[in-house]
Amino acid sequence: MSSDTAVEQKSTDIIEIKDVKKYYPVKAGVFLRHVADVKAVDSVTLNIRRGECLGLVGESGCGKTTLGKTLVRLHEATSGRIYFDQPHERVDEIERMLASEDPVQVSEANRLRKEIDITKLSPRRLLALRQRFQIVFQDPSNSLDPRMLVKDIIAEPLVSQRLLGAREIDARVNELLKIVGLSDEHRVRYPHEFSGGQRQRIAVARSLATNPEFIMMDEPTSALDVSVQAQILNLLKALQDEFKLTYLFVTHHLLVVKYISNRIAVMYLGKMVEISPTQDLFNQPIHPYTKALLSAIPVPDPKTKREKIILSGDVPNPINPPTGCRFHPRCAFAKDICREVEPQLETIGDGRLVACHRWREI
Amino acid sequence: MKPLVKTVDLHTNFYTFEGVVRALNGVSIVVNQGETYALVGESGCGKSVTVRSMMRIVQNPGKIEQGKILIFFNEADKDQGIDILNRSEAFMESLRGNDISMIFQEASASLNPVLSIAEQVGESFFAHRSGEMLASTIGTIEAELNEGRNFLVRFWRNFQLTMYRREAADLERFKGWMVDFDNRLYELEDSTEGASVRERNRIKAHRERYNRTGLLIRFVKKVPFLRRYYGRVRNTVKHEVIKLLTSLGIPNPANIADRFPHELSGGMQQRIVIAMALACNPILLIADEPTSNLDVTIQAQIVELIRKLKETVISSVLYITHDLGLVAEICDRVTVMYAGDTCETATVAEIFERPLHPYTEGLLKAVPKVDQEGALNTIPGNVPNLVHPPTGCRFHPRCPKAMDICSKQKPTPVEYSSGHTVSCHLYLPKENQA
């Protein structure tokens, strides 16, 4: 097939995130002096492969949604690079130039970044690129404009991109409605006339309108009921197969992410702690936080009684995160090194990465 | 197993602009003593309305139309039970927060943002255990009485003591009156005659006036400086609150007690709400989705806390949840609800092994499992609008096994095996179907 060969020519990573930070300033005093930073996302490096569904899990406040929104530039990153669909060699080249001491090379790299780095793109280039990545928000009752008709909501990306004429847009809207399991009769209704599941279908249709390659899903099922959640998950899976989409699936529901993802990235307090293929992660979690997280899932089967690891305390404040490994105050295996040195993500084989000093011993 | 709370054929309707929302359509559930019971269902199926009816706190425009709610709390009414729908509001006030207490769904919304934690948790001590609080305050003042050298200090302590004794006496006296008022109100409950309506309003006004304190106390509480005598009992309550928070394993309780809700994390707020519910050692604890907004690790902490408390303090726990995983882990018995109907009641092991009702079956298959393979099963369609609920069995438009009779007749509950009740035409004897 021609499309397959086209995929081979492109690089395997659709998005490369390099060292992205997102800090929110905390201001205080009469002059609103900058006193501290909320380190929502702190030096995250992550690759999203073409055609996969990468699950991003973590507790609330760990920065997973912030990372996702920074990725599609709904938030401006404080620093870091995000490359969308660039050949691997080119990314390496720019990274090498940025790391070099030579100011000429660094400024040359920064010039290049304005063309390909999502965090630095000019508005016009960004708009053009927005065709290719889209987002589905958490709560469909908030993300759909209550005063717009469904057909206008779905057509909005096409209108703002000026891609199609009015008649073509009409046909496209009908097509999209059919794809997500709604029908023509739903075109001229308002969002409040739909149930939660149907609203989420409309949001999915809107995100598909421009034929994107990458969709960021920000907890698309957390506002839905169990039986409707299953419908939406199956729909998303079918769409991924049909349109060869890449998903970043942000959620805190681990069984959902297990159902839909190929790979899972676990975040804790703005840092990646473990990245691993789904099966391996569930069979053999390595990082102590992942272990605790997995053991805390309530299993819908009364016969399996598992040992639970109950973590003490809450997630620490990201304004003043713990030194060293950020998980050490809640970790049962913490040693002196964990308190002092920050662990880096290291590759441990089988495409797994973990950030823990003591993973070999545990 | 002895029953603790029982609802019989409960109907609750909401009179809205769009029409009458028939939220409960004859709900009969039994919570036994010493068990953890779960109500499971999707949003809008009437789980919350059921427990709100059980505490008689259905909000306007809701109204309990029909049915009985029997409680079996005291030795005297072990066999008969008291139908709380017939009792007066005073009786319900003595029940709520004392014998039955509830953890509400969203902790951040159920806490008052302008009161400190100590004040909020202390409210139930004032409402239900003020006698004890006064007695212990009087005890501490009596112990200190002769310590003060200063004349003023001694005078002030004596004054405090007099006031507190007076208050305790008032409380005792009015308690009897309250019962009398209560009984009179109960007699006059349904009458529409002019004279008895006037009588009822008069009694209600009296009840209001004599609630807790007499005239003198109320006067002193208005006088600047003198009213400060009351601080002692507040301190006692605060000590009790800190003791309670400590027993719940909240770190640094003295500090937390002085804080305000917005300063606490979600998990901590939920723990405070649990503390409020447990202040008076309730017999039945109703937990309305206590963990649905929390992360799994915090959820595990909270669930563990409630499980420990169940072993030591509370008799029964009624969980409302949509998380079947949680049900499988902590509950003994479960009722599945759909659109205001109870579908199926059984022990947890039984319901996961042999789900009988097609809705239960669909629900169990729609949850992603740890060893999930292949696509998830879905239940087609959506939850119906309860202004115009489907006729007959309310599940029939979405049911894969629907028969002709399902749309015509509401199925009666049938005991399939011991302790496993199901409301479905599939399991009714054939002659009834004809």
Image: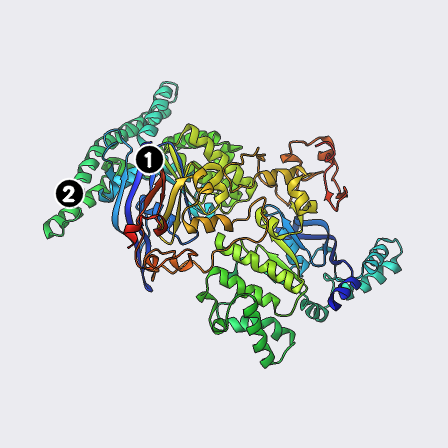
The residue indicated by pointer 1 is: B99
Asked whether A1 or B284 is in front, the reply is: A1
Which subunit holds the residue at mark 1? B
Quarter of the figure with the N terminus of chain B: top left
Q: Compared to A133, does B47 lie above or below?
A: above
Residue A30 in view: no
Q: Residues within 10 Å of mark 2 (few under 14, many from 20)?
A: some
Residue that appears at 46% across and 45% down: B107
In the image, what residue occupies the spot 12% across and 48% down?
B196
Q: Amino acid at mark 1?
A: Asp
Location of residue B275 (image quadrant): top left
Q: Residue at x 43, y 29 (%)?
A: B311
Q: Position of residue B184 (x, y in %)?
A: 16, 41
Please tell me which residue is depicted at 71% across the width and 30% down the height of the picture: A335
**SS category of the residue bearing label 2:** helix
Question: In the drawing, what numbered circle is on residue A355?
Answer: none
Q: Is residue B272 above or below residue A104?
A: above
Res. B187 mark: 2
* Amino acid marked by disc 2: Glu
The image shows residue B368 at horizontal and vertical percentages of 55, 48
Between B298 and B231, the one lying in front of the other is B298
Residue B170 screen position, x and y as percent: 24, 32
- Give the left or right position of residue A53, taking residue B116 as reference: right
